[in-house]
């Protein structure tokens, strides 16, 4: 990896060369507890995750639906905090130096830690990107631009309501990939209509060369395969956190996440 190329950028270059979409998987750090969450995290690359989003648990996850809200609450109840989340990243890096990892969540825990302190610790732990859903482009000076100094990608969200006037501002400092939210509302909501989403993604491509990942409401291998036909990556979160919630034991939750990830990865790989 070159000095200035992040793992995210390298991974999407590899995916493009292989002419396939990637699978981006989300779990909440510390759900249902630190040890079992770490076991799940460490198992994701071998199960087929091309990029991992690791949620930073927060008490008021306003953009998330019930599944991810509950996963965040389970983690916080079990004592998860930012230091433990970064410890999980370090543990992954001891075993895997290639799979990109993105921390996803809200600005408050980062602000409380201190931006400079957080970015330094995240960079040293092996974090490759950030998705901070409540920091719009108007506040890029807060975190987005400082993250660039640490070679950490700042991944922005675009939605069906992001119009042509606002899109250039959204894209301006986005790096790594653009996360296209395929439906309005919260995470885990209604499944996207592939034909509509394909048209919206193609419209964005006219303005940028950055890879586009599509998420929100994708739960099954069949849905993932259809989205992978035109997206650069398919993002799945709530379906995986549901696996943890519904499992009889934490170990069974990890196995269910691994099984679903493997089936999603197989579907994404055969889409083209």
Image (cartoon, rainbow, N blue to C red):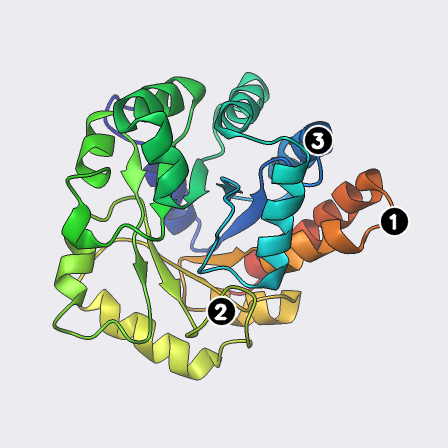
In the rendered image of this protein, does residue 31 appear above or below residue 3?
below
Disc assigned to residue 191:
none
Between 146 and 6, the one nearer to me in the picture: 146
Q: Quadrant of residue 202?
A: bottom left
Mark found first going from the N terminus, 2 or 3: 3
**Pointer 1 local density, CA inside 10 Å: few below 14, some 14–19, many at least 20:** few
Dot 2 alpha-carbon crowd within 10 angstroms: few under 14, some 14 to 19, many 20 or more: many
Q: Which residue is mark 3?
A: 39
Q: Is residue 264 visible?
A: no
Instruction: Using the numbered discs, state the Cα–Cα distance from disc 2 to disc 1 in whole angstroms.
Output: 31 Å
Residue pointed to by mark 1: 248
Please report whichever mark, 1 or 3, sits nearer to the chain's N-terminal start: 3
Q: Residues within 10 Å of mark 3 (few under 14, many from 20)?
A: some
Marks 2 and 3, how far apart in space?
28 Å
Whether 187 is drawn above or below 3: the answer is: below
Question: Which element is circle 3 on?
Answer: helix
Q: Is residue 187 left or right of residue 160?
A: right
Percent x, y of residue 104: 44, 44
Which SS class for mark 2?
helix
Residue shown at the point (41%, 64%) measured from the top left: 231
> What residue does disc 2 label?
227
Q: Nearer the viewer, mark 2 or mark 1?
A: 1
Of discs 1 and 3, which sits in the foreground?
1
Determine the residue positioned at 65% across, 60% down: 239
Q: Is residue 258 visible?
A: yes
């Amino acid at each position: 990896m070159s000095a200035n190329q992040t793992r995210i950028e390298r991974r999407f270059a590899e995916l493009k060369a292989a002419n396939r979409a990637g699978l981006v998987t989300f779990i909440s750090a510390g759900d249902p507890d630190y040890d079992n969450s770490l076991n799940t995290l460490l198992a994701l690359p071998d199960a087929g995750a091309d990029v991992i989003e690791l949620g930073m648990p927060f008490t008021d996850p306003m953009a998330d639906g019930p599944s991810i809200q509950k996963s965040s609450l389970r983690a916080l109840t079990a004592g998860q905090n930012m230091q433990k989340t970064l410890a999980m990243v370090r543990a992954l890096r001891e075993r895997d130096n290639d799979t990109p990892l993105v921390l996803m969540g809200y600005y408050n825990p980062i602000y409380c830690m201190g931006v400079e302190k957080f970015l330094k610790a995240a960079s040293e732990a092996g974090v490759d990107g950030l998705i901070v859903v409540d920091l719009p482009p108007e506040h890029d000076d807060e975190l987005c631009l400082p993250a660039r100094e640490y070679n950490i990608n700042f991944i922005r969200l675009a939605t069906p309501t992001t119009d042509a006037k606002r899109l250039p501002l959204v894209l301006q400092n986005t790096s790594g990939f653009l996360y296209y939210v395929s439906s309005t509302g919260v995470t885990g909501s209604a499944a996207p209509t592939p034909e509509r989403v394909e048209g919206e993604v193609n419209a964005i491509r006219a303005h940028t060369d950055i890879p586009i990942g599509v998420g929100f409401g994708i739960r099954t291998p069949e849905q993932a395969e259809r989205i992978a036909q035109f997206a650069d990556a398919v993002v799945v979160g709530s379906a995986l956190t549901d696996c943890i919630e519904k499992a009889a034991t934490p170990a069974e939750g990890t196995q269910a996440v691994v099984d679903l990830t493997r089936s999603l990865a197989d579907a994404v790989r055969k889409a083209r």
